Amino acid sequence: MSNDAVDTTTPDTPEDERSAFEMAQEEEEDVDPRTIPQKLEEEPPIGEEIEYPDYPEEDHETWRILVERQMEQLPGRACEAYMRGQEVLQLEADRIPDLADLSRRLNEETGWTVANVPGLIHEKNFFSLLSQRKFPSTNYVRGRDELDYTPAPDCFHDIFGHMPMLTQPEFADFYQLYGQA
């Protein structure tokens, strides 16, 4: 496997290499399929290869609500590094950010790019991407009925929750080392 390829070598996963979600799925009948990790069969779109979805206005409105609610919570709670990361990424409340734009900003700051993944991915794929300074992010936005919690990863969690810290060199290096471990 080359250094810049995603590890997709998980066909017929032996029982001891199954994810916790895969094992739980066998035990539970009503598992939300969004919580089952997907194994990437090929390299996901990276950086400029990522196409911006045609989001309905309701998704942009959901994004706005989520951003405004969280921004109210940040003063006195978020560290300076996170707040600087928010400024670097130039996150706006009125529309869902373009992952390709965020990838460009991250790359300029710390050499990271964004990999557009379909949702929750298998841990081998996840750590492989991190080890290559590629942050996996979905472009899915949770529904209005899941404003407070969604069992599935969504772009709000990925972008607002993780990406600001990836603009900070020490944290960006830590994430890469975490992926390599």
Image (tube, grey):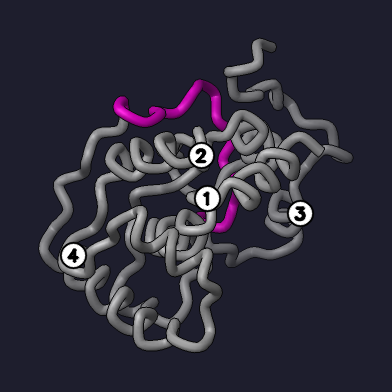
Q: Amino acid at mark 4?
A: His
Q: How many numbered callouts?
A: 4
Membership of 91 in magenta stretch:
no
Membership of 42 in magenta stretch:
yes
What residue sits right under mark 4 in the picture? 60
| Kind of element beneath mark 4 | helix
What residue sits right under mark 1 in the picture? 166
Q: Residue placed at 63% from the left, 52% from the top?
A: 171
Residue 36, percent across and down?
A: 59, 51
Question: Do callouts 2 and 1 mark residues in contact (Cβ within 8 Å)?
Answer: yes
Residue 31, percent across and down?
A: 59, 63
Q: Which residues are magenta?
A: 33-49
Q: In the image, which is nearer the foreground, mark 4 or mark 2? A: 2
Q: Amino acid at mark 3?
A: Ala
Nearest the viewer among 72 and 155 is 72
Structural distance between the alpha carbons of marks 3 and 2: 32 Å
- Residue 110: assigned label: 2
Q: Amino acid at mark 1?
A: Leu
| Kind of element beneath mark 3 | helix
